[in-house]
Amino acid sequence: MSNTTFGLMVLTMSVEDLFHKPVKKLKKFVSMCPELSVASRLSLRATRSNPSTNPQPPAPSSHPPVLSLLSGKVVVDYACGPGRYTIPTARMVGPTGKVFAIDIQPLAIDIVKREGAKAGLANIEARLIDSFDTGLPDATADVVLLIDAITPITDREPLLKEIHRLLKPEGVLFVDSSHMSVKQAQAIVEETNLFDLVKVDGKEMVWGKRKQS
């Protein structure tokens, strides 16, 4: 994709975001994902029951409670584009969490780095890739975001294999079916036999990592 084409895509996304805020989609994702919510609550309960692991009281969150459940998580924003979800996610996971922003477009990585620095976010690592391999270790991520990406990426099996490798055993994949039907997007993921469907709501789907024999 040329820089000009990518620039036009960024402009289109900016207009879309005026009407459909990325934070709202992220909030919907967390509310759709009981596994993530339960795990976060158990972690918080354990910390509270053992004050020595957290001697200082946690700073108050500026996000709604449902979004605070992402605190401390490792998130991979695959095909991150200009970082429209990377930046708010980095704020949500907080300083103890991490967001890996992955894209094949150099300009996208440049924008994410610039916007992350401008926002004072030190928990973003932007990675430029030239294939589906992110170079990250196995079982790195609690969450992988695949938003507005499943339609333009045509060779989807290696993409989904890499996401499966990246996810922790209890990790979750959030897919936005974007410009294809939910039924079509669901079939694409199901055909890999790598994920189990947790929930569908509108254009969004949450998937759990399937254990491989």
Image (spheres, rainbow, N blue to C red):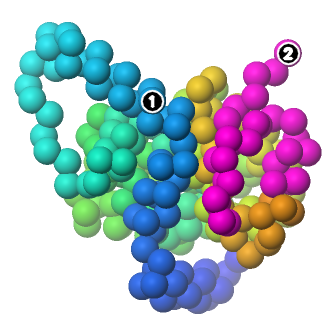
* 49 horizontally vs 145: left or right: left
What residue sits 56% from the left and 67% below the top?
81
Report the quarter where the C terminus lies. top right
Residue type at the position of mark 1: Val
> Foreground: 115 or 128?
115
The residue under label 2 is 213
Label 2 residue SS: loop
Magenta segment, which residues? 186-213
203 in magenta: yes
Query: Residue 206 at what x, y percent from top left?
Result: 64, 47
Residue type at the position of mark 2: Ser
Q: Is residue 178 above or below residue 104?
A: below
> Foreground: 191 or 201?
201
180 in magenta: no
* 129 horizontally vs 143: left or right: right
Q: Is residue 27 visible?
A: yes
